[in-house]
């Protein structure tokens, strides 16, 4: 018999409100012209990279406004949402594949392993012959073994492999990652 019903945690909602309301924010990020207010302690608690940047000997420690280069504002916003709520934000379906690619890169850059794995899982579900080359290169660059396996699985099909090999992207992959192509060949055409 249960006498007390304990509700599920709603801490993620409280932290999400903290982010959206910017109450007590003590750092601002400028990303591609957009400004994002945040809380140093929250960022540092979730990311060892932010910990080092905001509380270590790095120059960002003393800065109130930090410019983030090489990232789109929508990707930074999605990453902040995850940091505060431990959930993926709603992403427009048209942009989902591209934003998830970029979000995986950001997760790797800021040492957000759970976000990286969530992105890797989402990307595994939308691999096709038009995306497999860029996805395979991404998986190799960022150490995403599950994503790499999913790409290899798609390329085990002779018709898929033939289609992909006829692309310019495959030629670029061949030139830039020859060891990855050797690994692919070992997977799709194992020696007896």
Image (cartoon, grey):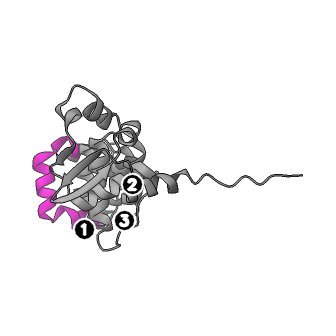
Secondary element under disc 3, as helix, strand or loop, is loop
State the extent of the magenta-drawn residues as a range: 160-180
Q: Nearer the viewer, mark 2 or mark 1?
A: 2
Location of residue 10 by image quarter: bottom right
| Circle 3 residue | 126
Most foreground residue, 123 or 13 = 13
| Circle 1 residue | 130
Q: Is residue 153 above or below residue 116?
A: below
Location of residue 144 by image quarter: top left
x then y, percent, for residue 163: 22, 68
Tell me which residue sits at (85%, 52%) in the image.
3
x then y, percent, for residue 148: 33, 49
**Is 167 in the magenta?**
yes
Secondary element under disc 1, as helix, strand or loop, is loop
- N-term-proximal mark, 2 vs 3: 2
- N-term-proximal mark, 2 vs 1: 2
| Circle 2 residue | 19
Question: Could you give the CA–CA distance between mark 2 and mark 3, rounded to whole angstroms?
Answer: 30 Å
Extreme-right residue of the structure = 1
């Amino acid at each position: 018999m249960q006498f007390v019903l304990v509700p599920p945690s709603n801490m993620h909602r409280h932290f999400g409100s903290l982010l959206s309301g910017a109450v007590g924010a003590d750092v601002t990020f400028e990303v591609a012209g957009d400004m994002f207010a945040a809380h140093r302690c929250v960022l540092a608690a979730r990311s060892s990279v932010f910990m080092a940047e905001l509380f270590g000997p790095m120059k960002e420690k003393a800065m109130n406004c930090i410019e983030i280069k090489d990232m789109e504002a929508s990707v930074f916003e999605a990453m902040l949402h995850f940091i505060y709520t431990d959930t993926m934000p709603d992403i427009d379906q048209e942009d989902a594949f591209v934003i998830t690619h970029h979000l995986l890169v950001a997760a790797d850059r800021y040492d957000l392993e759970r976000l990286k794995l969530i992105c890797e899982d989402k990307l595994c579900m939308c691999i096709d012959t038009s995306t497999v080359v860029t996805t395979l290169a991404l998986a190799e660059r960022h150490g995403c073994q599950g994503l790499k396996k999913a790409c290899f699985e798609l390329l085990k099909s002779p018709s898929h492999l033939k289609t992909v090999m006829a692309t310019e992207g495959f030629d670029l992959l061949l030139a830039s990652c020859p060891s990855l192509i050797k690994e692919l060949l070992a997977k799709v055409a194992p020696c007896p």
